[in-house]
Image (cartoon, rainbow, N blue to C red):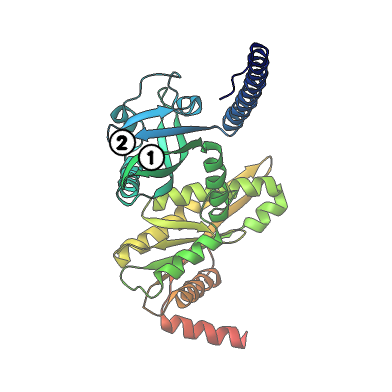
Amino acid sequence: MATLSLEACHAEIARLRLELSARTLDIAETQSVLSHQKQTFVRALTLARMGVWECTLPENRLEWSDGVYDIFGLPRGARLERNDIAGHYKPASLIELERLRSAAIAEGTGFSFDAEIVTRMGDHRWIRITATAETEAGSVRRIFGTKQDITDEKIAVDHIRYLAAHDVMTGLANRSTFQERLAMLDRREDGLCLLLIDLDGFKLLNDTFGHAVGDDCLKETAQRLEGLVQDRSLVARIGGDEFAVIIEQKSEAHAVRRLAQKIVDDLRRTITIGEASVEIGASVGLAFGDGSGPERLVKNADVALYAAKAGGRNQFRVFAPPESEALGKRRKTG
């Protein structure tokens, strides 16, 4: 075997040193790129109010990125005990989280879940948790994922849902919610009744004092109705000066009649501004469910409301078939 000369050895050593230097430079550049990417990733997580977490099994050893510490209001790098962290979740969220986590570990899958937590400072937040199970040798050894603060998103979505279901001015259920509730009740008979309420003198009030005073009147009417009905029924504003009350739970007929009379009495008032005054009152139509469906119930209550107005206003009437026939003839001949 040929042996290298001393000069050849020196040349080979020089070549290897150059190669090592080049590789060292490549490694340094790679580390710089990775560091920059990591910083970019961390910034992106921070902007998204998100962090990364993992839990090693079976020890349940937790590791969090800074973003998760921030979400829970805990000092970054603080020691994590799973039982202590579980105490930050609201009971309903914790129960569902444990169910999803157990299923993911048992099946080697993952999940996504929105949970409500209470931070170390006592603030209530909503977080979106994503989780993936990692399997080794047929067993789940680790679950990991992200946690993101979605409190603002949750508030915005809830507000949109509220606006879709409620009258903006009065805060009562709107006509859409009223119709949906009636549709859900469908042909239920037991204890169901409906009151339709129409303000008397409201147009004169608007014409005399303007819409701002009219709006205040509607708001006060809504408050009075909620105070009379309380939480046993649905109170809705279904038109300009039209309101409705659905009583779902079984109530004695005389008790509902008393409620109708209280509404008439409580909504009667005089509004005075300067030397002008307007009398405000309410006509109420009451109908009891008879199993014929929500459309018929509304029609029956409307017939009773028409009778209350035709009878002089500021009173209530209860729907009865003979009354309906008489009014029908009156409308045809009138």
> For the point 42% across and 48% down, which residue is it?
111
Relative to 60, is 196 on the left or the right?
Answer: right
The spot of residue 84 in percent (x, y) is 31, 27
The spot of residue 46 in percent (x, y) is 57, 29
Image quarter of the N terminus: top right
Amino acid marked by disc 2: Leu
- Whether the residues at callouts 2 and 1 have beta carbons within 8 Å, the answer is yes
> For the point 41% across and 34% down, which residue is it?
54
* Of callouts 2 and 1, the N-terminal one: 2
Residue position marked by numbered label 2 in the rendering: 57
Task: Give the answer, above or below, for where 3 lies relative to 232.
Answer: above
Report whether residue 278 is seen: yes
Q: Which mark is residue 50?
A: none
Task: Give the answer, above or below, for where 221 lies relative to 115.
Answer: below
Which class describes the residues within 10 Å of circle 1: few (<14), some (14-19), or many (20+)?
A: many
Which class describes the residues within 10 Å of circle 2: few (<14), some (14-19), or many (20+)?
A: some
Task: Give the answer, above or below, for where 148 lies relative to 279.
Answer: above
Question: Whole-Å distance between the Cαs marked 2 and 1?
Answer: 8 Å
In which image quadrant can residue 43 be found? top right
> For the point 66% across and 58% down, which residue is it?
203
In this rendered view, identify the residue nearer to me: 303 or 108. 108
> For the point 46% across and 52% down, which residue is it?
225
Helix, strand or loop at mark 2: loop
The spot of residue 256 in percent (x, y) is 35, 63
The spot of residue 129 in percent (x, y) is 45, 41
The residue at the far front in this view is 1
Residue position marked by numbered label 1 in the rendering: 143
How many numbered tags mark residues here?
A: 2
Image quarter of the C terminus: bottom right
In this rendered view, identify the residue nearer to me: 75 or 20. 20
In this rendered view, identify the residue nearer to me: 149 or 28. 28
Amino acid marked by disc 1: Ile
